[in-house]
Structure formats: C-alpha cells, structure tokens
Image (tube, rainbow, N blue to C red):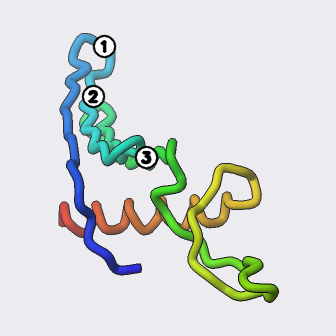
Amino acid sequence: MGTGFQGDVVSDLMDFAFKRLPDIRIKHRVKQNWLKMYNKAGSVLRLEMVINDPTQFKIRKKVWRNGRNVMEWVDMRKGVAYLFRYREVSLAANGRYLDALA
C-alpha cells in the first residue's frame, strides 16, 4: 500500500440557490469514485463518499496462492460482504477531507 496516486482529481461546485432552502455542493471526482460535501441552508455540513469502482481500493483477505491460503491485499469488490470495508474507506476519506479543511 502507500503508493502515491497518479491521476487527475476533478472538482466542481454547484450552487442550488434556486431552491427554497439554498445549499451548495462541492464534488471531487477521482476516476469513478467521488467525495461530495453539502452545505445545507448554511447550517449543516454533510460529507458523502460514493464508491462506484471499488477495485480502486484494497482489502486484506485470505486467498489461495500456490496451493495454500495466504493473507494478501487484493482489489475490493462490490457486494454486501465488503460493506465493512466500504465503511472504513469512506470514514477515512471523510476524516482526511475534514482535517484538510480545518
């Protein structure tokens, strides 16, 4: 793990001033995954992590290699069995984002 990201981060800002309760959304996209931050009516800050391509993240699990079971970091897959890892990845990303804002 620990390899640096080599790619683009695309960010956009959307102002929903036309709604009854105005709010703002900032979305940061990395490949097919994104982190969104909403400012609801100027009083509630909400973060949301969307994982559309879980193969960009790793999970440590037992795999069969060369005739034996070994623990290894492998690509995360879609599925209910990996919800705990989705939670870990999302909380870590949201935490780093909030630390950067502070």
Q: Residue lying farthest front?
A: 66
Q: Residue at horizontal 65%, vertical 50%?
A: 78
Q: Residues within 10 Å of mark 2 (few under 14, many from 20)?
A: some
Q: Residue at horizontal 32%, vertical 21%?
A: 21
Q: What amino acid type is highlighted by mark number 1?
A: Lys
Whole-number angstrom distance, CA of label 2 to CA of label 3: 15 Å
**Mark nearer the viewer, 2 or 3:** 3
Quadrant into which the N terminus falls: bottom left
Residue 65 horizontal side relative to residue 15, left or right: right
Viewer-side residue, 43 vs 47: 47
- Residue at label 3? 48
Quadrant into which the C terminus falls: bottom left
Contact check, label 1 and label 2, Cβ < 8 Å: yes
Residue 60 is situated, as x and y percent measured from the top left of the image, at 62, 78
Q: Is residue 91 above or below residue 64?
A: above
Q: Is residue 33 above or below residue 42?
A: below
Q: What amino acid type is highlighted by mark number 3?
A: Glu
Residue 16 horizontal side relative to residue 59, left or right: left
Mark identifier at residue 19? 1
Whole-number angstrom distance, CA of label 1 to CA of label 2: 8 Å
Residue 53 is situated, as x and y percent measured from the top left of the image, at 50, 46
Q: What amino acid type is highlighted by mark number 2?
A: Asp
- Residue 81, quarter of picture: bottom right
Q: Is residue 36 above or below residue 84?
A: above
Mark identifier at residue 23? 2
Question: Is residue 84 something one can see in this rendering?
Answer: yes
Which element carries disc 3, helix, strand or loop?
strand
The earlier-in-sequence mark between 1 and 3 is 1
Mark identifier at residue 90? none
